Each structure stands twice: as C-alpha cells, then as structure tokens.
C-alpha cells in the first residue's frame, strides 16, 4: 500500500463529498483541502487559500509534496492550474485550460460540438450590428434561450417567452461581452452524465438528475442546484447507449485529436426529448454540485485509484465498478438564496449520520464554517445538503428528509419534492 498525499481544491459540497470518499481510500494517508469548509476540516487539513489563488495553490502543492491534486471548481482550471501542475510534473485531476474552455466559453463548446458532430440546439452568434429581431423570429414559437459567452457562475442563461426580456438580455450581454448566443429551445427532461476521461479511455458514472429551480414543482429562480438523485431513470439503457454512441465517444475522440488528453471529468448536461434521442445542453469541466454528492457514493472502486489513473492516462487499465443502490440529496439553502443569501447564522440540531433499514444518511457540508467561539455557522447560499443511499430511491429520499428536518438554521429553505420525476414514474 502506497502512502499518498492528496490536495482537493475548492470549498463546497462537492469538495466535501470528494474528501469523504478520498478519506476512505486505502491509498490516501494525508488529505488536504483549500480552502475547504467545516465538513472537510474533520477529514482533511484545511488551508485558507482561495480556489482562485493559483500561485498560492502551487506553493501549497509543493509544500505538502502532493501526489495528486483534485480540482473541484472550473475557475482554477480555466485559469490554467492544471497546465502549471503539469509543468511541475504533479498529476492533476482536471483538464488543462484550453480544454477547460469547453465550460469557459459556450460558443467554443458549440463549435466543438459542431466539429465533433454531437447533437445540440441550433444557435446564432449575435454581436454589435446583428439583426436581433430576425434571429428572434428564426427561433419563435418557443421560449428563447439566450446564453452569455463567459463564466457567469450559473447566471449567464435566460430562458424566456417574453420577447422584450430576451431582446434586452441580448443587448446587455453584447454590451458587456461583445457577443452572445441565441439558441433554439430543446424540449424534454434534463439529466447529468459525469464522464471520467483521460487519453486512454472514459468511464460513465451513473446518470443523475439535478433540480435547478429554487422551489417545489420547478418554480422560482435558477440556482446552483437544490437537490439531486441517482440513477435517473430518464437515462434508460437505450438512452444511455445513444448518449455514449452519439455524444461521449465522439467527444472523447475529438478531445484526443486536439493532441492534449482531457484528464478529469466531463459533465454532460443532457436534454432527453420524448424520442429518447439525447441532445447536449451544456458541458462543464468538473463534477456537478450537488450531483457529485450522490454519484460518488455509488462508486465501488477506490476513488483515489480512479482519479489517479485518469490523471495519468491509465484509466483503461482499471475496472471501475458501481454499487447497485439509489442515492438522493436535499440542499438546505440560506434565507434569501439565490438572490442575496444571509450568511453568518448558527446551524443547530443534529448533523450526525443516521441509519435505518439498510439506508444511510449523512450531511454534506457546503457553505459552512466556524465562528470565533467554535460555533458552526452558515457562510454561503447553499449551506449543506442531506444525502442518503439505500436499496430503493423512496427509502433514500425519505431518510434524507428525516435528517434535514433535524437541522435548524433560521430562515433556511429546502425543496420538498426532490426526485419527484422518478418517484411519480409508473
Ligand atoms: P446552461 O448553463 O447552459 O446549463 O443552461 C442553464 C439551464 O437553462 C439548463 O439547465 C436548462 O434548464 C436551460 N437550457 C439551456 N439551454 C437550453 C436549451 N437549448 N433548451 C432548453 N433549455 C435550455
Ligand atoms: N448542478 C449543476 C452544476 O453543477 O452545474
């Protein structure tokens, strides 16, 4: 057994989930997290270095003599953290900046999909002087989908039936960014497929479904994600097979043809219409949050082995296996989230894991920290999530809700209908 030092970059629920699985690895003897949160502090050594402080992260990597750096969020990848680690010959789970641009620029992602012949919505690129009315007429009869071509932290997309709103978002985006995308609306049900990739191959993790709107019934503003469950039945065997044949394999081939292997996880946001022929809504170059929290627990193979293999083009050599279980997670959001979350409030009640009839539930910390008295407090919009894993989706969802009901945070809210699509499927 080798003794490995691992650094996880980031400080949200996704990074707590990564630390939880890595702390169970038989290979990992030292775990570090930068900056981490209250949850990671009990599994790893937290370092007060922001995920956007590339120089600070490189110094830390050297100081702790890391064998592997696992990058949670997209921003440090777009800012070339993986490129710099490659120069230092430190294995990194997360792609180099030119490949991370698949998330950094929606136009680039569209151009790659076109080049790789991957199904996605038709689109227009609009800039100063473009005929906005003609473009809106071209995609009329649906809601309009307008996407800014920048990393906008989930706030760069407007889907609207209101022509004036679409028009003004197009205009303001052109003013800010120089150009903007107008996409045809894709009907259907969304699902997230996380695909671990390297130069030797790829492994699809079980598909999940996120709940992006703030309130029950998919109402209210868009958020980073209010809950998720896995596996998502909308990705049936045939949909899975088509996704691999028409999207994942062509993308892997295309990325290989660029001459630089994609070493990390490609998040494929799918839209699955009634025909069962999936389209790509978006690519992200990282694990989804909260999809990560409910996907990693289904991995039977040691997570360190998978991530270390993918960071050095050895993925094809390992047999990645999964548990036949169902997971769900429910996000506890701060008062005012997503518009203006209230931070710094005490979190009380029981955060201890619970078990019942073969189901386990636990807390994934996200925006949590400690105040000067050592009291657990909220520090972000998505504060934590309660996750569960069990032999049926119903049982996992039930226990996740039981756990969240035991936690108190003034003004907080959570959705009461996580996994409703799967649970209402006959
Ligand atoms: P994105 O940031 O590209 O994932 O877009 C945010 C959300 O907007 C997605 O999760 C979808 O719900 C919705 N969306 C984006 N593009 C489309 C599209 N072409 N058709 C329908 N909905 C879309
Ligand atoms: N849960 C959606 C995302 O991570 O982008």
Image: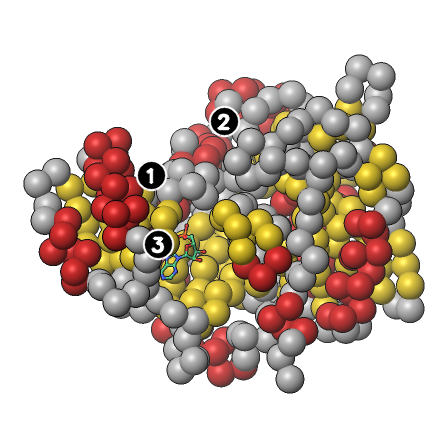
Q: Which residue is mark 2?
A: 52
State which mark lies toward you, 1 or 3: 3
Quadrant hosting residue 250:
bottom left
Q: Which residue is mark 1?
A: 150
* Vertical relation: 41 (above or below) 288: above
* Vertical relation: 117 (above or below) 48: below
Residue labelled 1 has its Cβ within 8 Å of some atom of ligand 1: no
Q: Tell me if I can see residue 258 in this picture.
A: no
Mark 2 touches mark 3? (CB < 8 Å): no
Inter-mark Cα distance, 2 to 3:
32 Å
State which mark lies toward you, 2 or 1: 1
Give whichever of 57, 143 is nearer the camera. Answer: 143
Residue that appears at 25% across and 36% down: 172
Q: Secondary structure at mark 3?
A: strand
Return the disc, 1 or 3, that comes first in the chain's sequence: 1
Q: Secondary structure at mark 2?
A: loop
Q: Which residue is mark 3?
A: 160
Q: Tell me if I can see residue 402 in this picture.
A: yes
In which quadrant will I find the C terminus?
bottom right
State which mark lies toward you, 2 or 3: 3
Residue that appears at 59% across and 75% down: 233
Answer left or right for 381 relative to 37. left
Q: Position of residue 291 (x, y in %)?
A: 60, 55
């Amino acid at each position: 057994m080798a003794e490995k030092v691992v650094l996880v970059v980031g400080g949200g629920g996704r990074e707590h989930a990564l630390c939880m699985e890595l702390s169970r690895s038989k290979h990992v003897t030292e775990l570090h997290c930068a900056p981490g949160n209250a949850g990671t502090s009990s599994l790893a050594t937290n370092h007060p270095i922001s995920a956007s402080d590339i120089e600070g992260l490189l110094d830390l990597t050297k100081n702790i003599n890391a064998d592997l750096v696992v990058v949670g969020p997209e921003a440090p990848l777009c800012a070339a953290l993986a490129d710099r680690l490659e120069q230092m010959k430190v294995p990194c789970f997360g792609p180099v900046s030119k490949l991370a641009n698949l998330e950094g620029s929606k136009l680039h992602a569209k151009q790659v999909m076109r080049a790789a012949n991957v199904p996605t919505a038709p689109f227009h690129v609009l800039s100063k002087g473009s005929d906005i009315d003609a473009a809106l007429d071209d995609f009329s009869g649906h809601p309009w989908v307008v996407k800014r071509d920048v990393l906008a932290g989930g706030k760069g997309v407007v889907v609207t039936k209101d022509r004036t709103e679409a028009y003004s978002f197009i205009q303001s985006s052109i003013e800010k960014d120089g150009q903007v995308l107008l996409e045809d609306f894709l009907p259907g049900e969304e699902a997230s497929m996380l695909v671990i990739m390297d130069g030797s191959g790829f492994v699809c993790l079980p598909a999940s479904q996120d709940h992006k709107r703030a309130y029950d019934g998919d109402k209210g503003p868009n958020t980073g994600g209010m809950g998720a469950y896995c596996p998502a039945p909308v990705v049936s065997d045939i949909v899975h097979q088509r996704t691999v044949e028409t999207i994942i394999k062509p993308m892997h081939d295309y990325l290989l043809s660029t001459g630089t292997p994609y070493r990390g996880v490609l998040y494929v946001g799918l839209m699955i219409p009634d025909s069962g022929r999936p389209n790509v809504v978006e690519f992200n170059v990282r694990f989804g949050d909260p999809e990560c929290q409910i996907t990693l627990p289904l991995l039977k193979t040691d997570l360190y082995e998978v991530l270390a293999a993918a960071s050095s083009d050895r993925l094809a050599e390992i047999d990645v296996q999964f548990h036949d279980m169902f997971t769900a997670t429910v996000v506890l959001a701060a008062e005012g989230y997503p518009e203006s979350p209230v931070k710094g409030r005490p979190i009380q009640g029981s955060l201890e894991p619970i078990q019942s009839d073969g189901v386990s539930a636990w807390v994934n910390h996200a925006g949590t920290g400690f105040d000067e008295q050592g009291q657990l407090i909220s520090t972000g919009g998505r504060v934590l999530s309660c996750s569960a894993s069990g032999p049926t989706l119903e049982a996992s969802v039930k226990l996740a809700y039981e756990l969240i009901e035991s936690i108190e945070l003034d003004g907080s809210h959570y959705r009461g209908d996580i996994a409703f699509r799967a649970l209402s499927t006959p």
